[in-house]
Image (tube, rainbow, N blue to C red):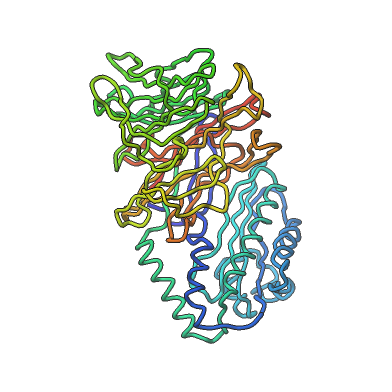
Amino acid sequence: MPTADGSFAVCIISFECVMVRILPRTLFSLMLIQWIVSLTMGISAHGQESFRVAIFPFQFHAKENLDYLQDAIFVTISSRLMEDGDIEILDREALRNALPSPETNQITEQLALSIAKDLDADYAVVGTLTKVGEFVNVDARLVGIETSGPPLRAASQYRGLEAAMEGLAEFANRTRRRIALASAAPQEKGETQAKSTISSLYEKVLDGVRGEKPPPPQPQRGLETFQTMSTFLRGVDVGDVDGDNVNEIVLMDKRNLWIYKVTGGRLRLYRKIEGHRSDDFLTLDVADLNRNGFSEIIVSNMRTGILRSFILEFEKKRIKKITDRQKWFFRVIGNSATGQTLVGQKMAVNQRPIGKIHGFSWRGKTFHPSKKTLTKKEIPVFSFNFGDLEGRGEQSVIYVDYHDHLRVLTQEGAYRWESPDSYGGTDIFYSVGSQGSNVAENRVFIPPRLLVADMDGDGISEVIVSRNTFKLNMVEKLRIYDRARIVNLTWQGMGFFESWETPEIAGYISDYQLKDIDNDGKDEIVITAVSKGVLRSGASSSLLVYELF
């Protein structure tokens, strides 16, 4: 599945085709490290000994000379590491003197580790910075000198050097937290038995919790340039809409649907469906739910304060509504491997989603809700899914709440976990209250979809979720995003760790899917990304396609 060097490329459809080299993030979360450390508390201990960190010069790849950034990078990382007073930064002159020659300008990770070990350091920080035009790719790594755990890695793309320095500052903060957790039960150097025990525990976690997983799947190539979409795309999904055994791509904005075919590596417009001028399309799903060989197009829709969701299907080469004016918010959960299910949630008198979630089944000529609910708790229908997080045949409920926190419940509704950080994030909403009211307080935001799939075939469900970051959050109901990515999460008993992520992009991810977009028998990650424009004025959208292998 992965490439030899663990990198991948991404092609942006609707702007320009851009090849971006990135590397996956660390395989273990801080929770996992804390768990391992807690198991080894009795093995060794030492007082308040500080940890020594060697920060090596970053390697630059750019047309212009960026050597002037070395000082800024060193100060940015070192100042944050030394905030708590328990981390010592090795002298830069000592590092330079330890190089094979003064002319050495290519410092490999192996060379850095060798030098750091000779200088009695506990950790080494190495990295590269690549600048192409205004875009800057940073790959920074914290590597333990005598630890068997994986490195802490941050690989992201930024627009401009200033944003890249902010990213390095966040990497330094994460580095400090990683070292702080390790210091909870540090080992004296030379205690080989303790180190052997820790290594054994580490391997046991790998074998017992994750199994012999291959490195995370990496995107490799994308489709060629298609066109610019001068609109705010809200949704994307993939399916065999016209029953020709070839998948089409469906895109959605506020009141339009586009169906595209992939021909010769390019997209060709097949159908455009225009809604009513008062329509407000909120969610999009594409799936063959009635098993007739034609994938339905399912849209949650508001019209002048009234919920009027509908389902489209091809019939005799024409698209018709097989379900219309439904007072349900719709979503499709599951995946092509485990089966897909149409689910729905009602709207309250105050025009907000309410109640538990019902499944739908096809009977006669339409879809009917089941009397039995699928969830014990009232959660957002837009952003939930079921998954076997531990490979034991027990389904958990995973969802992003209205405050952008990822939550896990048992199937009976009991609390299991809540993320301390934010996931999801959305700028898709509808307004409630008096007709035409669009003030911030009257907005109901729609959390983004959440995908669950066993991507590496080990019987354990992984969670794929978007992560949009605020640029402006003046009030809770006014959101402007400037950074976004997709992350893959794997359960570790006490919480999730991020096993891989896409590059950080400038803008906002409005929707995404994991389906076979180019009909090669393999699923790709498909993303609609929105950029440009303030408060949606002049918005422009892109289709990003990451092929996994």
Q: In this image, 51 relative to 330: left or right?
A: right
Left or right: residue 456 versus residue 476 is left
Residue 104's place in the image compared with 381, above or below, is below
State the residue at coordinates (36%, 66%).
208
Tally the marks: 0
- Residue 90: x %, y % from top left: 70, 74
Q: Nearer the viewer, residue 331 or 29?
A: 331
Q: Nearer the viewer, residue 92 or 166?
A: 166
Residue 226 visible in this rendered orientation of the protein: yes
Query: Residue 493's quadrant in the figure?
Result: bottom left
User: Where residue 371 sits: x, y (%)?
Assistant: 31, 32
Image point (58%, 74%), residue name: 184
Image position of 206 with respect to 453: above or below: below
Q: Nearer the viewer, residue 459 or 379?
A: 379
Q: Residue at x 71, y 69 (%)?
A: 84
Q: Is residue 469 left or right of residue 359?
A: right
Residue 139 appears left or right of 471: left
Report which quarter residue 121 is drawn in.
Answer: bottom right
Residue 109, by quadrant, is: bottom right
How far across and how far down the image is residue 130, in percent?
62, 51
Q: Residue furthest front?
A: 349
Q: Position of residue 8 (x, y in %)?
A: 48, 48
Observer-nearest of 214 and 175:
175
Q: Taking the image as drawn, is residue 545 in sight?
A: no
